[in-house]
Amino acid sequence: MSATTDTPRGDLAGFRQYLRNDILAGFLVFLIALPLCLGISLACGYPPIAGVFTAIIGAIVTTFISNSELTIKGPAAGLIVIAIGCIEDFGGDGMAGGFSDADMTAYKAALAVGVAAAVLQILFAIFRAGILGEFFPVSAVHGMLAAIGVIIIAKQFPVALGVDAKGEPLELLREIPHFIAEANPAIAAIGGVSLAIMFLWPLAGQRFKLLKLIPAPMAVLFVAVPMGMGFHLMEPHHYVLSGHRYPLGEQFLVAMPDRVFGMFDEVTLPDFSALQQARAWKWVMMFFIIGSLESLLSAKAIDIIDPWKRKTNLDKDILAVGVGNLCASMVGGLPMISEIVRSKANIDNGARTRFADMWHGVFLLVCVALIPTILHRIPLASLAAMLVYTGFRLAHPSEFVNVFRIGREQFVIFTTTLIAVLATDLLIGIAIGIALKMIIHLVNGVPLRSLFKTYVDIEQIDDETCLIRTHHSAVFSNWIPFRRQILDIGLVQRQNVVLDLSNTLLVDHSVMDKLHELKEDFEVEGLELTIVGLEGHKPLAPHEHAARKRTMFNLRRMTILAASDLEERLEEELLSRGATGYSVIPCSGPRRDALADNLLVRIEVILDSEACDEVLEFIRNELLPRHQVTACVESVHVVRQDPFLPVNGQSHSAAERPTAKSVS
């Protein structure tokens, strides 16, 4: 399937050949996208139709600019925090209590901010700066995304309960018990059932395969809309429960045009005078930096799971997103990115080319243009529940566990970034995470001069292979020039690359992770990237992508003195415990025990702690009851530990330095 002749391409021939596959995938993605576009738009403080504008424009415009074959462009939960922050900074309240004149003013100002950010994205792409997305450390980015998830939960949970709430994320989190106590029971029932469906539907799909044909967000609407009709939400009224009087009405439903093709009446132009205010440019930079980063990360992630391993030109993809954002902001739409969840669904539903994205936009256009009055019956609580679920997935407990497994220092960076974003904002939070990572690198011995600059030697091994020898460090902050050299020699000049990291003091997690990706890129091109020289580096955690630090390894040196007739038995035991190098020395000397009249052997071996304990246990239980044996153990530091561990059945030697001594 990976052969070039079998690889689907988004050209005219591909459009014709894969029309059925792409239309089907586009329709199924449309079912997921429709409720999410509405919910994300409302959470951003924009009119609900704004998210649909974005998805339609993103689907149709970007399809003909980007070469990314499987990504879906549209509004994303990851930008909610920035969008609602921008709206509130300009005096809006996120449509709480209806869409007021102040909300409209803030909305138009946010559109101008979106236009300015889009222009920066276009310039960013024209100057081929998409590679800057490689700069951000993985753990800090994951911490930022987890923080976004927490913020979405904090802001949308009250909406799912039918409660009005304002405040900073940490304040809203503290108020959750109060929100539950003040919940509107009818609205909370819709929100609770919708949230349960979002969590349980994937599990039900594993048991009943037919359920997989219906996306969870659409299943929510199939239940929530009838519930809303049962509570007569189209008619303003009150009800009394347990002595409390609760309101119901259209304020709990999605605001949509009241006639066919009414969506075109909702087109709104930006207020560019807002850009004269200094505060506007803070949000311009946030939309530009965070939006571009999330889009680049999503495009790269989809490339990894693309069944045909097609590669996205990141500069073209950012150009497409920038042009799409420019068009969307000019007519009243939200900012867009390459959205990961819908893109994954696109792949799962059998998409072949970028035209699946276009078809999902066409279905959105037809649906919102023709049946807006039906969409008006969607309860806000059901959309909020979908976003609470999305936030939970961004901040899923497994994210914390996975980061901790990669290394404690990565967990510190992850949690620090998360807390910093919650306490400040996205830009300051990610900057704090990056600064902390640099400090940790300096503490781990990375020279200041190599923090941003790479030091490499290049040696031609033969006509097809080149050796790149790296010095000082290979860390996230000098990864971009480092990566450029590897790609230039490997994928551009079509050579195999041997990367020698033996002279580095530290190889951080971000570089280990990205080198793993590069190895796959080389394999796709029929080339080989071989990484050597990490034998003298100690992983900071058992994970294969954990940071590696050059250090001395703690092992144990065992000296055994026994009768020569036990030599073979002892050697068998050592070999069974993984010993690959040991010395046997015949010896003699004055002794007081029974060994004095026998030929003796002295066996020296270096083992890890576990193997050493097992050998000692063998001597105590199997030999000492019948034989005279002396065993001494001391801790040693070795430059490399692989010579003392099984490596392809071979033995090597290494320098060692005793540090402490004990006798058993």
Image (tube, rainbow, N blue to C red):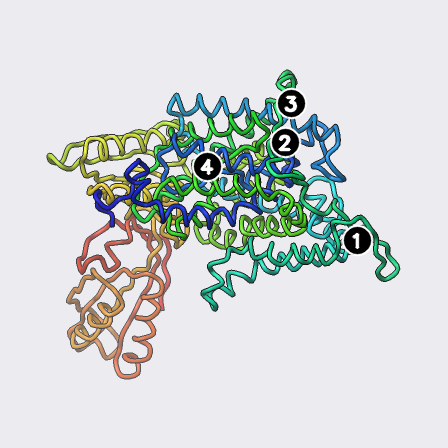
Which residue, given by chain and number where applicable, does mark 1 sit on? 182
Tell me whether the residue at label 2 lies in contact with that at label 1, contact meaning CB atoms closer than 8 angstroms.
no
Which residue, given by chain and number where applicable, does mark 2 sit on? 266
Viewer-side residue, 153 vs 113: 113
From the image, state whether disc 2 or disc 1 is nearer to you: 2
Residue 403 pos. (x, y %): 47, 50
From the image, state whether disc 4 or disc 2 is nearer to you: 2
Q: Is residue 349 above or below residue 122?
A: below
Q: Residue at x 60, y 54 (%)?
A: 221
Which residue, given by chain and number where applicable, does mark 3 sit on? 279
| Alpha carbons under labels 4 and 2: distance apart | 19 Å
Q: Return the disc, 3 or 2, that comes first in the chain's sequence.
A: 2
User: Label for residue 59?
Assistant: 4
| Alpha carbons under labels 2 and 1: distance apart | 34 Å
Tell me whether the residue at label 4 lies in contact with that at label 2, contact meaning CB atoms closer than 8 angstroms.
no
Q: Return the disc, 3 or 4, that comes first in the chain's sequence.
A: 4
Task: Give the residue type at disc 2.
Answer: Glu
User: Label for residue 81?
Assistant: none
